[in-house]
Amino acid sequence: MISSIEIARTAVRALRRNKTRSMLTALGIIIGVAAVIAAFAVGAGANKSIDEQISSFGSNFIMVFPDRSAQQSGNTMRYLTYDDAKAIEDEVSGIEAVAPMINTSATIIYGNTNWSTSVTGSTEKFSQVQDWEIAQGRDINESDIRQGAKVAVVGKTIVDKMFFGESPLGQSIRVNKIPFNVIGVFVSKGQSQSGGDQDDFVLVPITSAQKRLVRWTTPGRIGNIYIKGVSMNALQYIQSETEVLLRERHRIKTGQADDFSVRNISQILEARRKTTTIMSMLLGSIAFISLVVGGIGIMNIMLVSVTERTREIGIRMAVGAKTMDIRAQFLIEAMILSMIGGTLGIILGIFTGYALASLTSAPPIFTVSSILLAFFFSGLVGVGFGYYPAWKASLLNPIDALKYE
């Protein structure tokens, strides 16, 4: 019986004689493996991004904001108000904290330096709801809210861009030309998953924002309300009770559309997760089909190779090659083709994963298990689809094979 090493050398020589055909045969495997790796990497990266967003927002987090498509009720425009937020905090159980908010943009001036940033007007509950910590100074408090005090807590980016190493505490900055005294600095959070700078903002008392920055005509009007529940299990109850309470306060009759929306952040992100999963499954299906097509291509080319090399097979059998030797040679050829395709597919899959991830702003995650699985499956395809041609070659009659032209 011929040694395994000699069989492998013979298989390699046979493939090298037809390099172009061999590479074209492996192309289906290359595409299939690349698709498998890219699908796993992009899906894992997107899910990790969603998990980090849930973690940064807090999974027990609810947002209430105006529904502008339904705000018109007769001749009256209805908005969320500061009293709505207080009512939710007082009347809905299961809540840890409620933060009414106003978000606007402004130009900040200190000395000869100016900087465009976002300004948030809120209460002392803002930091609790959004999980912000104070690095220097103090946070805004109830007294600041009652007085409409012109005080501000700034993010790390504001300190870096405006003060250049100088302590901001006690300094006066102008927000849209209105002076605010800096009383504190937040601990840096860095960039968000979407690439935004979380530290580039200024927090002021919501009453100061209402009176001095936005100057809305509707009394007590706010932009939105953030609610933090005591636990994940309490969210559904909080959401339904908040909807009932706001419908009562806004005098919305049965059958009328709400002029607000209540959204559970984990529900929003979970919907995104499902979309990502569906896309990963779609890519995975395409990858599976590509591998099957690649396997069929290998089987087809190997059958052609058996026909072309019938006389060679007859000569080998005549000089002592056994049935198992012939079968092993063609199986090894099929496996080598699939392994070459698997290796090149891994390289292509990594490049493809990064290219696709650039469209989703979530870096791909390549795991050893997914790469090994794709490589193993490519080898399995080679064995599975290469077995029939190998079996057919091993059953040739030596005398008939030697007569074949």
Image (spheres, helix red, strand yellow):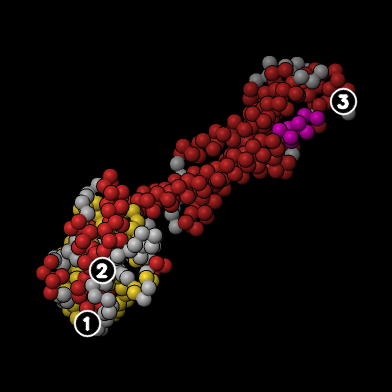
- Name which residue type carries label 3: Tyr
Q: Which residue is mark 3?
A: 404
Callout 3: 10 Å neighbours few (<14), some, many (20+)? Answer: some
Q: Secondary structure at mark 2?
A: loop
- The residue located at (17%, 64%) in the rendering is 124
Q: Tell which circle, 2 or 3, labels the residue nearer the N-terminal end.
A: 2
- Single out the mark in the foreground, 2 or 3: 2
**Upstream in the sequence, badge 3 or badge 1?**
1
Residue 178, numbered circle: 1
Crowd rating for badge 2 (residues with CA inside 10 Å; few <14, some 14–19, many 20+)? some
Residue 401 rendering spot, x and y as whole percentages: 84, 22
> Is residue 343 or residue 236 the one in the foreground?
236
Q: Is residue 242 magenta?
A: no
Q: Name the residue at 46% across, 37% down.
A: 369
**Three-letter code, disc 1:** Ile
Q: Which residue is mark 2?
A: 81
Query: Can residue 195 be seen by looking at this rendering?
Result: no
